[in-house]
Image (spheres, rainbow, N blue to C red):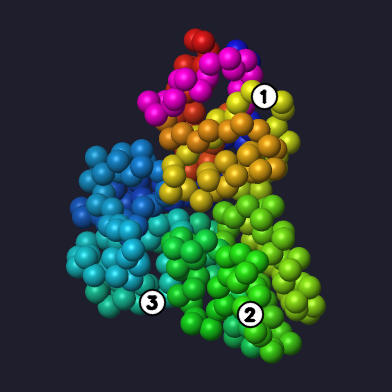
């Protein structure tokens, strides 16, 4: 079997930064809470749990609501960022705050605030319910949130000054269509593409992947950037693709009659999970 490891692999810089911050906090603080998963990978979250970190997360609840469950100790804000309201609430509760927000997400917050202050109508493109979106939308209730082309049809902005930016882990191929449609509707719109470089290079690598019988994407189903890799492989590269979180959950039946395998992974996927699958593939 020929195995092509599609580079780049391993953690992006934002994930490396977040994990470094929370691991340093473990050595300096007694009681540590992560407000939401520090990154979207269950193997990482379980490892932190074994080190004493308490992750506060529940589907359907915002970071602001989850903060009600933390009354003392240290709270770590995840790589996805939080709204200013969460920051203020944590301060009022006298919690020790450690911010592990990805620098790229911080930049999106900064740019959004700047353009709101300059009188722009601001549009934000993202995935509904994603914590990164929650943090940005919490900056102001004046931000127009869109996820697809139909949402653009519903926009009715009269301001001559319009600014649009986006969630950092979206598909570069999906967002291009949205930018084009927005430009057609609002000719003076200021477009600020903030898909991070780690997301961009992985998606482009998959779009141009070598010929194969099967492509394997390794990642967590909660990871936006990992799911987008699957979408790029199936819809752009048009390759038979499977999504798996680890070797144990790899359906071995799908490997029958497969001679060439490509393998990629999300920016929040530990390298050892990919390596385990590759070592198994070598035995076939």
**Residue furthest to the top:** 283
* Residue 270 location (% of width, % of height): 45, 35
User: Counting other residues with Cα less than 10 Å from the Cα at mark 3, is it few (<14), some (14-19), or many (20 or more)?
Assistant: some
Residue to which mark 2 is pinned: 155
Residue shown at 63% from the left, 80% from the top: 155
Does 41 sit above or below residue 166? above
Instruction: State the SS at label 2.
Output: loop
Residue to which mark 1 is pinned: 212
User: How far apart, in angstroms, are the residues tagged by discs 2 and 1?
Assistant: 42 Å
User: How far apart, in angstroms, are the residues tagged by discs 2 and 3?
Assistant: 26 Å
Residue 144 within the magenta-colored segment of the rendering: no
**What residue range appears in magenta?**
247-262
Query: Can residue 102 be seen here?
Result: yes
Choose top left, top right, bottom left or bottom right for residue 49: top left
Query: Can residue 81 be seen here?
Result: no
Total labels: the figure holds: 3
Residue 258 within the magenta-colored segment of the rendering: yes
Q: Nearer the viewer, mark 3 or mark 1?
A: 1
* Residue 277 location (% of width, % of height): 47, 23
Q: Nearer the viewer, residue 266 or 85?
A: 266
Of mark 2 and mark 3, the one earlier in the sequence is: 3
The N terminus lies in quadrant: top right
Lateral position of residue 254 relative to residue 64, left or right: right
The answer to whether marks 2 and 3 mark residues whose Cβ atoms lie closer than 8 Å is no
Instruction: State the SS at label 3.
Output: helix
* Residue 238 location (% of width, % of height): 68, 37
């Amino acid at each position: 079997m020929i195995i092509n490891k599609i580079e780049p692999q391993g953690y992006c810089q934002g994930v490396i930064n977040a994990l470094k911050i929370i691991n340093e906090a473990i050595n300096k603080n007694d009681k540590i809470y992560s407000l939401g998963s520090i990154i979207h990978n269950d193997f990482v979250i379980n490892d932190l749990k074994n080190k004493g970190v308490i992750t506060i997360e529940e589907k359907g609840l915002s970071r602001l609501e989850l903060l009600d469950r933390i009354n003392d100790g240290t709270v770590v804000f995840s790589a996805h960022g939080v709204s200013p309201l969460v920051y203020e609430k944590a301060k009022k509760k006298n919690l020790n705050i450690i911010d592990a927000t990805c620098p790229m997400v911080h930049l999106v917050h900064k740019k959004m605030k700047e353009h709101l202050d300059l009188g722009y109508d601001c549009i934000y493109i993202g995935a509904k319910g994603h914590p990164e979106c929650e943090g940005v939308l919490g900056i102001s209730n004046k931000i127009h949130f869109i996820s697809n082309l139909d949402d653009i049809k519903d926009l009715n902005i009269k301001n001559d000054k319009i600014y649009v930016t986006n969630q950092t882990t979206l598909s570069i191929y999906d967002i291009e269509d949205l930018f084009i449609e927005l430009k057609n509707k609002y000719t003076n719109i200021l477009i600020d593409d903030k898909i991070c470089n780690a997301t961009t290079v992985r998606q482009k690598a998959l779009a141009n992947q070598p010929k194969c019988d099967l492509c394997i994407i390794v990642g967590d189903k909660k990871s936006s950037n990992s799911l987008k890799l699957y979408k790029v492989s199936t819809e752009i590269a048009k390759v038979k693709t499977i999504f798996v979180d680890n070797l144990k959950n790899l359906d071995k039946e799908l490997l029958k009659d497969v001679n060439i395998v490509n393998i990629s992974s999300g920016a929040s996927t530990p390298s050892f999970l990919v390596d385990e699958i590759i070592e198994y593939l070598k035995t076939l």
